[in-house]
Image (tube, grey):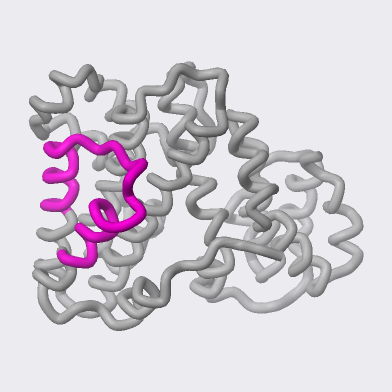
Amino acid sequence: MLVKQRKPYDLEILKSPPETVEEMMLWTRNLFLGSGTERVRIPEDVLGFGFEVMRKNFASAKDRSIKKLILRKILHTREVVDAGIEIMENEGGVDWDPYMACTVTFLHDMGRFPQAHFGDYSDIRTGFDHASVGAGMVLAAEFPESIAMGIDIKRVAEAIREHSRLSYVGNDEYGKFIRDADKLGLMDYFHFHVAEYPVPDGEVTPGALREFLVEKMVLKSDVVNRIDVFLCWLSWQCDFNFGATKMLFESGGMKEYMHSEILKMDEGVYELIKDCYQ
């Protein structure tokens, strides 16, 4: 089973944050401008804005735990940019603007960087709506180069505001796109993220299983044990907007990995859920 792997150097950075802002920015710039970024299309003023948000919040982090949160979100941003590019390249039914798409994916979590100073990325626990804050940050900034290129900053901000809502009732292609790219970027590296969940082993929560079986989003309030985490993330399939997203999730090996881990935890649950989302 082949699933995506993070580079050893990136894993080391997440484990041991750089001592200086200069080192952190060297790593960050390489993520978005270095080798392997040939397909990335982000206008310079958008990159400059995002880099400054990342730099400023890393510089003001009060301890290593906050720095680690910021570094995790920088790497996640790169992974979402990559996921968005893959969706664009495989979804032929849309006339994509690669600069618009990469701008949305690069900026989608700008609100997470100030949120990191709470020591938690839960909007509920922090009382901090990272999507709305991020959209406001983008609307308050100036992007003359991007606007001249035809990028609609208001559409970008709207997509950012809606990207993590439980549901999206709008019709904007990029509003749908960022929801898919964000989920795919997370799900592609689920095996790294699940290690961060401080949840015990145990039986499946009835509410989580019930919602999954009717192909609805499993609510975080029903996530109690490790198996619930797997069902929760797997249930994100119900919110995929594009056929390419489903195809990439399945062909990338992560769905097979999640199923195999559920089988190890509870064969009965696996038999119940294995044919969902076919």
Say left or right for 220 vs 11: right
Above/below status of 9 relative to 30: below
Tell me if residue 186 can be seen.
yes
User: Could you tell me which residue is drawn at 77 percent across and 41 percent down?
Assistant: 277
Above/below status of 226 relative to 187: below
Say left or right for 77 vs 146: right
Tell me if residue 129 can be seen.
no
* Residue 203, picture quadrant: bottom right
Instruction: Give percent across and percent down for residue 179.
Output: 48, 37
User: Could you tell me which residue is drawn at 75 percent across and 47 percent down?
Assistant: 212
Q: Quadrant of the C terminus?
A: top right
Asked whether 75 falls inside the magenta stretch, the response is no
Say left or right for 85 vs 73: right
Exactly how many numbered labels are in the figure?
0
Instruction: Give percent across and percent down for residue 58.
Output: 16, 66
Q: Nearer the viewer, residue 10 or 17?
A: 10
User: Could you tell me which residue is drawn at 13 percent across and 19 percent down?
Assistant: 148
User: Could you tell me which residue is drawn at 91 percent across and 58 percent down?
Assistant: 271
Asked whether 32 falls inside the magenta stretch, the response is yes
Range of residues picked out in magenta: 26-53
- The prevailing secondary structure element of the residues shown in magenta is helix
Q: Quadrant of the N terminus?
A: bottom right
Instruction: Give percent across and percent down for residue 84.
Output: 45, 39
Q: Nearer the viewer, residue 57 or 202?
A: 57
Q: Nearer the viewer, residue 106 or 128?
A: 106
Say left or right for 202 vs 111: right
* Residue 222, picture quadrant: bottom right
Instruction: Give percent across and percent down for residue 37.
Output: 32, 50
